[in-house]
Image: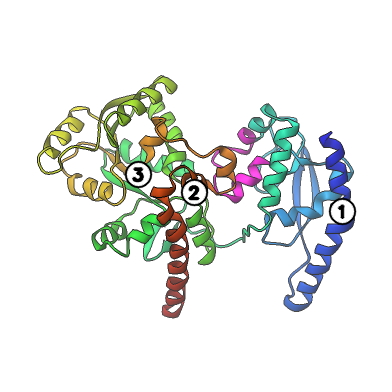
Amino acid sequence: MFKIIEYILALFIFLVVNPLVTIYLFLRRLFTGKNIFRKESILLGKDICRVRYFNSDYPILAVQSLYVHVLTGRLSVCGTSLRVKEVNKVASHNGKSGLYSIALLRRISRIDYESYDDMDIEYLANKSFKKDLMILVKAILKLPVIDPDYDKPDKIKLLDIEFLNMRMDEALSRIAEVIDSGRKEIFAFMNPDCFNRLFDDREYFELMKKSNNIFPDGSGVNLACKIIRKQLIHNVNGTDMLPYLCHLAEKKKYRIFLLGAAPGIAEKMKKNLVLKYKGLIISDSEDGYFDRKTETGRVITKINDSHSHILLVAFGVPLQEKWIAEHIDELKINVGIGVGGLFDFYSGNIRRAPKWMREMGIEWMFRLLMEPRRMWKRYIIGNPLFIKRVKNWMKGYNSEN
């Protein structure tokens, strides 16, 4: 059934959409001088094929010119990843490449943490008419998303705060290097809400400005990077990082201490994690409802007695960052990380958005629907405010440089 839909769609695109796009790009060339097409060498199985993409910053629009290869049977509408020869290696599987794939969708949303082979194997293991239809629908919804080939610096400065611009595996390697060297460092995640808090909390601003280990968190930061004409490599958020961090800790025998959230949440998270990751060592846990004035010493002693390498602190922003910074010299740990509401997700206390919403970059919408009274201000008011501040900052930044 999907093959028939696929062929009809390909024929429609080829006969109707492609000529219209070509006319648009031709007119653009007359006024701007930009080429209509860009040539790439792609891998189709083990063969190299020279193709012409539409020269567009919209990834979903760019691949429309390849529908002719769907008609000839060389490509599918939905399938495994479409690999550029100069960047990717030959696939380790025999799956048929598609114009749209989970690899493409995740790349656009900056959550393509796995290798192309792993994402393709995931697709092939779950391939069905329904799954392909969902990929097609998500691709159509991603049509307005721009993804220009901007500069990709190692660090990106946004609202006077610098954060690391790297792949998820590079972020984990950075954490491992700190632990293996015996050093002690603080790591943090910053999403649009965190950036907004900088304007009302000078202490938090100064703390983040001095930090060398900030990771970008959320689709809003990805959008902000496009506004300032920088390309974000990965959305390195804590919720996505934790499974990889657990694998790393399992392999390297790192001990993790869980501090924060409501009573019982950290312990429940601990049980869930050690059940899933058999070699993982969660050394101990403590909820976040202790008296900061009278019990902090006891908590620090408990952390130190656990001989933990990694301390995850879930007090919420900016309390968690301030607490770690205030007590880092007393703590016998290597890595302290503020993780916000992470414990609620991995304890099962709060559901996380389904993967398709994460692929679409609309996880915030799911959180708003789940907790409207608590989250409406952060997302409905906070997100537009963040973008406005980024645009104003960009104007001032350009005038100074």
Which of marks 2 and 1 precedes in the sequence?
1
* Camera sees residue 13: yes
State the image quarter where residue 271 is shown. top left
Q: Amino acid at mark 2?
A: Trp
Q: Which residue is mark 1?
A: 14
- Viewport quadrant of the N terminus: top right
Q: Amino acid at mark 3?
A: Gly
Percent position (x, y) of residue 225?
50, 61
Q: Which residue is mark 3?
A: 340
On whether residue 118 falls in the magenta region, the answer is: yes
Q: Amino acid at mark 1?
A: Phe
Percent position (x, y) of residue 129?
75, 33
Q: In the rendered view, does 190 fall on the left or right side of 222?
A: left
Q: Nearer the viewer, residue 47 or 6?
A: 6
Q: Measure how far apart labels 3 and 1 are at the Cα level.
A: 48 Å
* Residue lying at 46% horizontally and 44% vertically, measured from the top left: 170
Q: In the rendered view, does 310 fall on the left or right side of 166?
A: left
- Viewport quadrant of the C terminus: bottom left
Q: Measure how far apart labels 3 and 2 are at the Cα level.
A: 15 Å
Q: Could you tell me how many numbered marks the image carries?
A: 3
State the image quarter where residue 15 is shown. bottom right
Q: Nearer the viewer, mark 3 or mark 1?
A: 3
Which of marks 2 and 3 precedes in the sequence?
3
- Which residues, given as a range, are shown in magenta? 101-119
Which of marks 1 and 3 precedes in the sequence?
1
* Residue lying at 57% horizontally and 49% vertically, measured from the top left: 109
Q: Nearer the viewer, mark 3 or mark 2?
A: 2
In the rendered image, the vertical position of residue 399 relative to residue 208, given as above or below = below
**Residue 364, disc:** 2
Q: Measure how far apart labels 1 and 2 are at the Cα level.
A: 36 Å
* Residue lying at 42% horizontally and 40% vertically, measured from the top left: 173
